[in-house]
Image: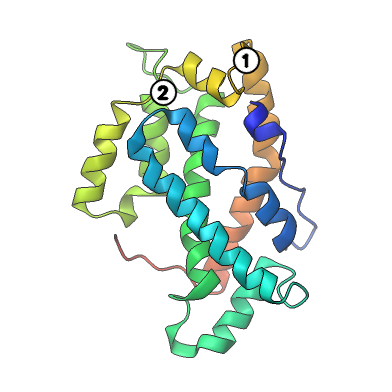
Amino acid sequence: MALLMEHQFRQLPADKQVETRPFLEAVSHLPPFFDCLGSAVFSPIKADIAGNITKIKAVYDSNPTRFKTLQHILEAEKEMHGTEWPKVGATLALMWLKRGLRFIQVLLQSLVDGDKDENNPNLIRVNVTKAYEMALMKYHGWFVQKLFKAALYAAPYRSDFLKALSKGREVKEEECLDKVRQFLVNFTATIDAIYEMYTKMNAELDYTV
């Protein structure tokens, strides 16, 4: 759990604007989450998330004052790129990043909600499947979906996954899940706000890869 709790997301202000710098700082610690899933098949998502963070950071670093919030970035790129927007720049990178973050969020929420395969209660396949179906599947073509279905069968045991989240420390399951619940509060609010922003600005794209 240390993996998540050491780098909490900030509470959002009333206007739900996501400040770019603290968002990038918190999110930059999330790619190792995919190592906890134990299968190399998840490494493309990990690489994708890391790559998209780098792209957004490069835009932010070019003018931190102008790009103080994620909304400022989208608004500026919409103006700069015209008809090519939103399939360009940090806007496109954040579109894919939020999907990877939603995958993490749904997986963790499913764990704390107690979703289990009654026949194999110590497997997290049910939770990983739910996360994939809700966050990523519709954006993936047939071939990528096949890869993921293979990965689901390699998903680790629940106890091993929670231990990996705790950086190898032995922890009580309930204690670990309590920390996951705490982490999810601001993390979920942040992701929801980004999704809402994409809907409001008509920046969402539905193409598959």
Q: Nearer the viewer, residue 185 or 148?
A: 148
Residue under the point 57% across and 71% down: 200
Q: Is residue 105 left or right of residue 37?
A: right
Look at discs 2 and 1 and give the one toward the viewer: 1
Q: SS at mark 1?
A: loop
Please, is residue 203 above or below residue 164 in the view? below
Task: Kindly identify the amino acid type of the residue bearing the numbered disc 1.
Answer: Arg
Q: From this viewpoint, is residue 18 visible?
A: no
Q: In what quadrant of the picture does the C terminus appear? A: bottom left
Q: Which residue is mark 2?
A: 124
At label 2, which amino acid type do we have? Ile
Residue 2, picture quadrant? top right
Q: Is residue 25 visible?
A: yes
Residue 207 horizontal/vertical position (percent) = 32, 66
Total marks in image: 2
The one nearer the camera, 46 or 173, is 46
Q: Position of residue 190 (x, y in %)?
A: 65, 52
Of residues 193 and 46, which is closer to you in this image?
46
Say if mark 2 contacts mark 1, CB within 8 Å.
no
Question: Looking at the image, which residue is at 44% across and 50% down?
Answer: 47
Q: Quadrant of the N terminus?
A: top right
Q: In x, y percent, where is residue 40?
A: 35, 35
| Image quarter of residue 56 | bottom right
Q: CA distance from mark 2 to mark 1?
A: 19 Å
Give the image's coloring scheme: rainbow
Please give the name of the residue rendered at 56% of the width and 58% of the height, measured from the top-left corner.
Answer: 53
Q: Earlier in the sequence, mark 2 or mark 1?
A: 2
Query: SS for tag 2?
Result: loop
* Number of the label disc, if any, that sits on residue 122: none
- Which residue, given by chain and number where applicable, does mark 1 sit on? 169
